[in-house]
Amino acid sequence: MSSKPQNELGTEDFGAPAGFWQHYFYVETPPGNKEPVLIYEDYGLDNEELPEKQDTSECRCILARELWTKIRDEAKHDFNTRLKENKQSTGQWNKGKVKLEKFLGKELCVLAWAAEHAVPDECFVIVQKWLSLRPEERWWLYSKTAAEAGKAEDRNRGWRKALYCALSDGENIKMPLKKIPKSKRIKAKEDTGQRTLF
């Protein structure tokens, strides 16, 4: 393990620290064109919660390939623009493992979590709304979602679905219609008089 400070080691891909013990995210893109894309968070040696665990990474999202192709280019452009401003390495979504700086990884998770419930046609709106969020807002959304439903298998839980509704029109989430009991329907028809506050 090198003892050089992180700024001397440099960065790779989307601004990820080059040291293997660092905290970063990565996207795993299989060689086939139909297999899903996986997004991982790797805690490196910062993982204090699981100090004896050898595998320091956790899968945050499994995203269908057709949805990934709808969101990846705008995310790449947004990240690379900001990385260039900070004179850091820029990245490409290549096959295999692509690393991201940890805050960019959190932002990508917010976008992927919103898209995982979508149909491809909804992804344009989701991406535009994600782009309108400030980085700090994306980090906050990541923290709220990861605390309750941050694992790949949590896709149908609270905040994960809420992200889809917030960044799209929400039509893909089907809610059962509540039936009004017959007695209340009859009373509503009879009650046509004008009401006052008192």
Image (cartoon, rainbow, N blue to C red):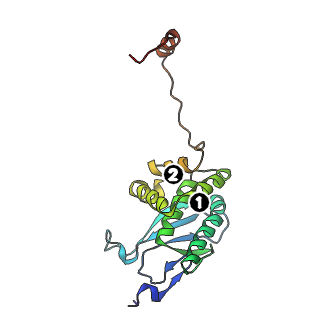
Number of numbered tags placed on the structure image: 2
Residue 150, visible in the rendered structure:
no
Counting residues from the N terminus, which is met first, the one under dot 1 or under dot 2? 1
Badge 1: how crowded within 10 Å, few (<14), some, or many (20+)? Answer: some
Badge 2: how crowded within 10 Å, few (<14), some, or many (20+)? Answer: many
Mark 1 or 2: the one toward you? 1
Of the 4 image quadrants, the one containing the C terminus is top left
Q: Amino acid at mark 2?
A: Leu
- Left/right placement of residue 191 relative to residue 172 reads left
Q: What residue appears at the point 44 percent right and 48 percent down from the top-left corner?
A: 158
| Quadrant of res 46 | bottom left
Q: Nearer the viewer, residue 87 or 189?
A: 87
Q: Position of residue 90 (x, y in %)?
A: 59, 78
Secondary structure state at the residue bearing disc 2 = helix
Task: Say the numbered circle drawn on residue 163.
Answer: 2
Q: Determine the CA span between mark 1 and mark 2.
A: 14 Å
Does residue 166 sit above or below 103 in this rendering? above
Does residue 107 sit above or below 117 in this rendering? below
- Left/right placement of residue 127 relative to residue 150 reads right
Q: Nearer the viewer, residue 55 or 102?
A: 102
Q: Position of residue 174 (x, y in %)?
A: 56, 39
Q: Nearer the viewer, residue 166 or 19?
A: 166
Residue 174, visible in the rendered structure:
yes
Of the 4 image quadrants, the one containing the N terminus is bottom left
- Left/right placement of residue 26 relative to residue 126 reads left
| Quadrant of res 115 | bottom right
Secondary structure state at the residue bearing disc 1 = helix
Q: Nearer the viewer, residue 35 or 84?
A: 84
Q: Amino acid at mark 1?
A: Leu
* Pointer 1 residue: 131
